[in-house]
Image: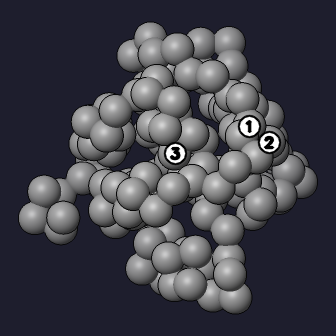
Amino acid sequence: MTEGVRNDRVRIIVVNEINLDERLCLNFCPYYKPAKNDKLACMGFLVVETLIERGGEITFDASKKKLNAVTEEKLMQNLCIVCPFYEDDCDFIQQKEKSLPCGGFTLLGNLLEANIIGIDDIKSGSRQNGLFDKDRR
C-alpha cells in the first residue's frame, strides 16, 4: 500500500515500508532535489512503485557500469515514451549536453540487465499507471 506524506518542503513516498525518495531518487537520480516541493514523478519512479506494490523484490543496488545500448533502447521505447517528462522536459531523451537518464531509468535498467525483472514488467507497470498506449510504440 502506498502512503504519501507531504509537507511544505519535501515529498516522501512510502511503499511497503520502502521510502522511494531515499532509496530510488536520492541514490539514482541526478535531477532529484530533496528540498524541492515537487509532486511530479518520472515514469520509472511510478513503475518501481507499482512493482513494489505488487510484491516485487526490488534491489536498490547501484551499479557503476553504464547500461548497454540494447537495454537503453528497450527502456526508451517502453518507459520513456510514456513518461510525463518525455516530450518537453527530458534532457536525456533530447540528448542535451550528454545528459544522464533519470533514476528510475537507471534502476530499471540495472534490474533488467540482472534479469530481476523483464520488459513486460515495465510495460505492465506503465499500463497500471494509465500511461501506456500501445499505439505510441
Cα distance, mark 2 to mark 1? 8 Å
| N-term-proximal mark, 3 vs 2 | 2
Q: In percent of the image, x 18 and y 64: which residue is there?
A: 137
> Tag 3, which secondary structure?
helix
Q: Is residue 96 above or below residue 73?
A: below
Q: Is residue 1 visible?
A: no
Relative placement, left or right, of 105 versus 8 is left
| N-term-proximal mark, 2 vs 1 | 2
Q: Is residue 56 above or below residue 25?
A: above
Residue at image mark 3: 109
Residue at image mark 1: 62
Q: In percent of the image, x 56 and y 22: which residue is there?
A: 58
> Tag 2, which secondary structure?
helix
Q: Residue 20 appears at what percent x and percent y?
A: 68, 32
Q: In percent of the image, x 44 and y 11: which residue is there?
A: 55
Relative placement, left or right, of 118 versus 64 is left
Q: Is residue 99 above or below residue 53?
A: below
Cα distance, mark 3 to mark 2? 14 Å
Q: Nearer the viewer, residue 105 or 49?
A: 105
Q: Residue furthest bottom?
A: 97
- Give, as a three-letter code, the residue at label 3: Gly
Q: Quadrant of residue 136?
A: bottom left
- Give, as a three-letter code, the residue at label 2: Asn
Disc 2 crowd, CA 10 A, few/some/many (<14, 14-19, 20+):
some
Q: Residue 27: which numbered mark, if any? A: 2
- Give, as a three-letter code, the residue at label 1: Ala
Q: Residue 33 appears at what percent x and percent y?
A: 83, 58
Q: In percent of the image, x 59 and y 13: which residue is there?
A: 16
Q: Residue 78 appears at what percent x and percent y?
A: 31, 55
Q: Nearer the viewer, residue 86 or 99?
A: 99
Q: Are marks 2 and 1 in contact (CB under 8 Å)?
A: yes
